[in-house]
Amino acid sequence: MTRAGPPLICTVDVVLLTLRDGALQVLLQRREREPFAGTLALPGGYVRPQEDRDTDAAAARVLREKAGVEGPYLEQLATFSGAARDPRGWSVAIAYCALVPADALPGHAVLAPVDRLPSLPFDHAQIVATAVARVRTKSQYSSLPVYLCGERFTLPQLQAVYEAVLGEPVNKVSFRRKMDELDMLEPIEGALSSGGAHRPAQLYRLRNAARQALVISGRGLNPRP
Amino acid sequence: MTRAGPPLICTVDVVLLTLRDGALQVLLQRREREPFAGTLALPGGYVRPQEDRDTDAAAARVLREKAGVEGPYLEQLATFSGAARDPRGWSVAIAYCALVPADALPGHAVLAPVDRLPSLPFDHAQIVATAVARVRTKSQYSSLPVYLCGERFTLPQLQAVYEAVLGEPVNKVSFRRKMDELDMLEPIEGALSSGGAHRPAQLYRLRNAARQALVISGRGLNPRP
DNA sequence: CGAATAGTGTCTGTTAGACATTATCGA
DNA sequence: TCGATAATGTCTAACAGACACTATTCG
């Protein structure tokens, strides 16, 4: 049997996206080790076969250890590989995408808006671009953006989240019709947002059925013309 | 710096899908080596860092070497990993999906319909299921199924391909309207299908612009109710 | 009451599917 | 001419977006 050849570098990298100041932002960290020690990069780390059940678990561990984030929405994105992307040698990076409400992040977290990233090492810029494209596309026809909200939110808030993610305005009536059809939200009895000098909004939460899996809509929001 | 730990098994596996007898079928091969020598499985192999530019190239090489298929549509699917999936130990398999017209396969190729698979080793059944789900979803709103056709095809043929992939009938008028809007096909002047005792159909080919990239439609075909 | 935002009713243009009609071949 | 399939015209129902209107809070 052919041997597996020289050992490969195998890592997981996580694109953690959140919403801050009305913009989609990605979590970056200063690298402690070479290569690129001291520069901002995606959180990542070696896969640890003894410790990690699979790469999903490795990504969750990286987020827990490096960002203090526990149990977020986490989805495998794609795998990036080759001789060129890492100066240490031929490598495989399994990239993950995480969505987290901003208030679930520790205060010291470094965030950068996805459309004004600093220069990133490895192929991290490409990985972020892939993640953003995926999240945008998926948000067109699914409940994905709710993972960027907290436990309780109003429909106007949720609409603003969709608009921030999609980068374009969403028709209010259509949006509410869609949310109604998808049947993924339930109003919290008697709970209204307060604060403004205006009519308060009904607070909603995710239905239990919608907690586990994304809710998918046949036709998307804002289909291309 | 922490060492990368014990070497991992890193492979690529390819789900080659084609259309035969009006059904979506997957290419399988008898394994020559342990584990599971002699059983049918997805074509796959170790990533070879010295030889392969990246895992995309590794997948293309596997298809070329093991199935004699050159330059097919090839797309990364997902990465499967963990201690449980391979008896040799903790492994990472980067899975790819290929679409090929049936007549581009060598005569001796072993195909199995995707909805009546034999028992497969490793997590290959799950990998096939993932590939089929992805191809179905993507075919709803893109030109993906054209890769299952040859160079020249008629609209009724293409519609039959869509129906076979999606597993449900497609409205003829809507289908033709959509193909027209997408503007990805061009009629071959003066070329008509022949053979039946009926009106012959116009032959089409992909426009050059549509050759390189998928053509994406805003609203899908057959949106869910 | 006025400003501001939440929430709803309704109209209209667009799109997709059903159905019917015409076209073109071989036998 | 008939059977069969290709190709197209047209009607209708569903849907999305625009706009206007009502509702409810604070000051």
Image (cartoon, coloured by chain):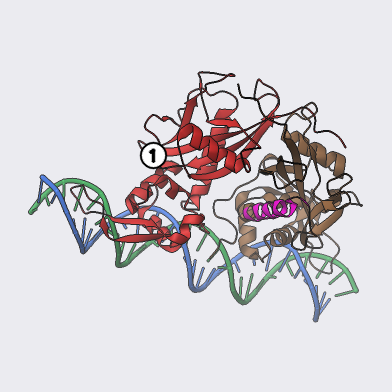
Chain colours: A brown, B red, C blue, D green
Residue B6 visible in the current orientation: yes
> What segment carries the magenta color?
A121-137
| Residue A125 counted in the magenta span | yes
Q: How far from the left and from the top, in percent, is residue B153?
A: 34, 51
Q: How far from the left and from the top, in percent, is residue A143?
A: 66, 50
Kind of residue sitting beneath label 1: Ala
- The answer to whether C4 appears left or right of B124 in the picture is right
Q: Which residue in the protein does label 1 denote?
A: B102
| Residue B117 counted in the magenta span | no
Q: Looking at the picture, tell me which residue is in the foreground, B38 or A138.
A: B38
Mark 1: secondary structure: helix
Q: How far from the left and from the top, in percent, is residue B3?
A: 83, 33
Q: Looking at the picture, tell me which residue is in the foreground, A50 or B167.
A: A50
In the rendered image, the quadrant that contains the N terminus of chain A is top right
Q: Looking at the picture, tell me which residue is in the foreground, A144 or B205.
A: B205
Q: How far from the left and from the top, in percent, is residue C20?
A: 25, 59
Mark 1 surroundings within 10 Å by alpha-carbon count, few (fewer than 14), some (14 through 19), many (20 or more)? some
- The answer to whether A17 appears left or right of B18 in the picture is right
- Looking at the magenta stretch, what is its main secondary structure? helix
Q: What residue is at 53 percent from the left and 66 percent from the top? A: A225
